Image: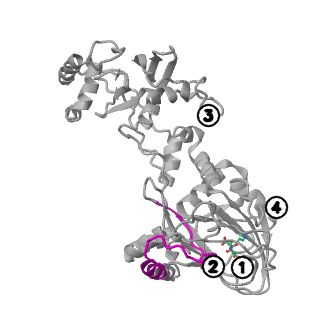
Amino acid sequence: MRRFLKSLLNLRQARQIARSAQGNSVRTAANSNSPILRNAIDRAALRSIYSWRTSKQTQHAPSTRLSALSRSMGVNANVVPRTVVSPHHQLSFDNKRVYIPWDEGVTSSYHNIWLRDSCQCSSCFHPITKQRLINTFSIPTTVHPESVEALDAGLKILWANDGHESFYPWDWLHLHSYQPVLEKHLSFRRVLWSRGDVQDDPPVVEFANVMESDAGVAEWTSKIKLYGFCFVENVPVTPDDTEKLINRISFARQTHYGGFWDFTSDLAKNDTAYTDLALGLHTDGTYFTDPPGLQLLHLLHHNGSGGESVLADGFKAARVLREEAPEHYKTLSRIRIPAHSAGNEDVCIRPATTSRPILNHDEATGELVQVRWNNDDRSTMDRWEGGDPDVDVIRFYEAIRKWHEIVTRPEIEYWFKLRPGRALIFDNWRIMHGRSAFDGERRLCGAYINMDDFDSRMRLTNLGREAVLKYL
Ligand SMILES: C[N+](C)(C)CCCC[C@H](N)C(=O)O
Ligand SMILES: O=C(O)CCC(=O)C(=O)O
C-alpha cells in the first residue's frame, strides 16, 4: 500500500494507472486524452488507491540450473524479477502508448509503434532464424490498439489498423521495459588478480572434460570470463588435438598469420613473435580494428633455456593506475595510439577506423572493456588531438611510463613456464602476455578466436539458449 501510494505521487503515473481504473473490463477506451476525461482519470487515480483487487499473479521461479551456474559466474540471474502485473490496476493505452502497472509500484509505458514493431508472433518474427519479418515501414505512425487484454501469461493487443493480434509475455515486457528501465541485462563478473592470487592455484580445466561435453566447455569459458585466462591440462601434444581443443569454443580467427598456427623462431612471418627475442607484456592485434578476443598457446617442445611466459591482468593494472594516478588513467583512456603490422611484404595492417586508446571503455556504461597495449607495434604518433602537443606529448610519455611501471611490478606479473600438454588460453582484450628470450628450438601452436564468437559460446553453454535469447 505504501509503495503504491508513493507511486501515485507521480501524477503522470497516477493518470496512467487511473486509465486502467476506468470501467471494469480489461478492455479500455481507445483514447483517454480528452481534458474532461483526464480530470476524471486523476480523480479515478486517487480513488483507485482503495480499489485494490486480487488477481492471478504471474510469477516466474528462477530456474535452478540458471541460478546455480550464473551464481558461479556472478551473473545476476538468481535475482529473478517479479514480473507481476498489479492486481489492483488494469492496463491502459492511448493513441501513443500502452501502460502496464506492475505490482512493484511502477508503471511501464511502451510506444505503440515500438510494440507493433516488436511483435514476436511467427508472422512478424521468424521463429527459427530469430529475425524480424514484419516490414517496419508498413506500420502506420499512428498505429494504436483497438483493445488490450491482460491474460495470465501476458498482454494481448488487437491492433486497430489491421486487426493484427500480438501477444507479449509479461516477463518479456518487464525485461524490455525502457520507460522506466526495470531490469539489467546480463553482465558477467570478473575476478581481477595479482600474481599472488593465481600462481599457486591458477584456473585450470581438463582436456577430456572440454572435449566430451558442453558442460566442460561451459566450465572452460566461464573460467576464461572470470579470470581472463585458463590452462587446459592433459592436452595431447599435437597440433591436431590442440586445434580440436580450440574448436570446442569456435573456429579460429583468420589473420595474416594464418588461422591455426604452428610456429617457431624462424621468422616465417616477419614479426618478433617468430624470433627468440624477449617480448614485453603486450596484447596482440592492436593494429586491428577488432583485436583478437582470445589467444590459445600450446608449447609443443623447447630444447633450450629461457622462454618463460608472463601474464598480467590489464584490468587489475588499470584499477591500480586509476587509484595511484587518475590523471594518467584519463590520458591513457583518451590518447589514441596508432599501430601497425607491416613486417610481411604483402601486409600493412592498421585500424580501418581511427586508432584506439590503451584503455577503452563501453560508451554506454563507462566500464573498462578493452586494454590495447603493445609498445613495439605502436606507430609514429604525429596527431595529438588534445590540441596542444606540448602538453599531450609529455603527458603521454609520463602516463605510459607509469603504466609500464605498474604492469611490470612483481606482484602484478605472473611468470611461469609453458609446458607440452598444458595449453594456455587468455582474453586478449584484458590479459597482457609476454615471454623471456630463449635459445634452442621452441615450437608452439595455437589460434585466435574472435571475442564475439567466444562471448556467444560462453553465454550459450553457461546459461542455455532460452535464457540468452530472452535478452535479444
Ligand atoms: C600468430 N602468433 C600469435 C604466433 C604471432 C602473433 C604476433 C602478434 C603481434 N606481435 C602482436 O602483438 O599483435
Ligand atoms: O612465444 C610465446 O611464448 C608468445 C609469443 C607471443 O607473445 C605472441 O605470439 O603474441
Q: Quadrant of the N terminus?
A: top left
N-terminal of the two: label 3 or label 2?
Answer: 3
> Which image quarter has ligand 2?
bottom right
What distance separates the C-alpha of mark 4 from that of mark 3? 36 Å
**CB under 8 Å between discs 1 and 2:** yes
Dot 3 crowding, Cα within 10 Å, few <14, some 14–19, many 20+: few
Lateral position of residue 229 relative to residue 179, left or right? right
- Is residue 348 depicted above or below 138 in this figure? below
**Is disc 1 placed on a helix, strand or loop?**
helix
**Is disc 4 placed on a helix, strand or loop?**
helix
Percent of width and height locating residue 88: 28, 23
Tally of numbered tags: 4
- The label shown at residue 376 is 2
User: From the Cβ of disc 1, is ligand 1 less than 8 Å away?
Assistant: yes
What distance separates the C-alpha of mark 1 from that of mark 2? 9 Å
Amino acid found under the numbered disc labelled 1: Thr
User: From the Cβ of disc 2, is ligand 1 less than 8 Å away?
Assistant: yes
Disc 2 or disc 4, which is closer to the eye?
A: 2
| Residue toward you, 450 or 3 | 450
Residue that carries the numbered disc 1 in the rendered image: 272
- The label shown at residue 240 is 4
Q: Can the viewer see residue 320 in this picture?
A: no
Q: Can the viewer see residue 32 in this picture?
A: yes
| The residue stretch that appears in magenta | 368-397
What distance separates the C-alpha of mark 3 from that of mark 1? 45 Å
Question: Is 207 included in the stretch rendered in magenta?
Answer: no
N-terminal of the two: label 1 or label 2?
Answer: 1
- Is residue 243 depicted above or below 377 in this figure? above
N-terminal of the two: label 4 or label 3?
Answer: 3
Residue that carries the numbered disc 3 in the rendered image: 131
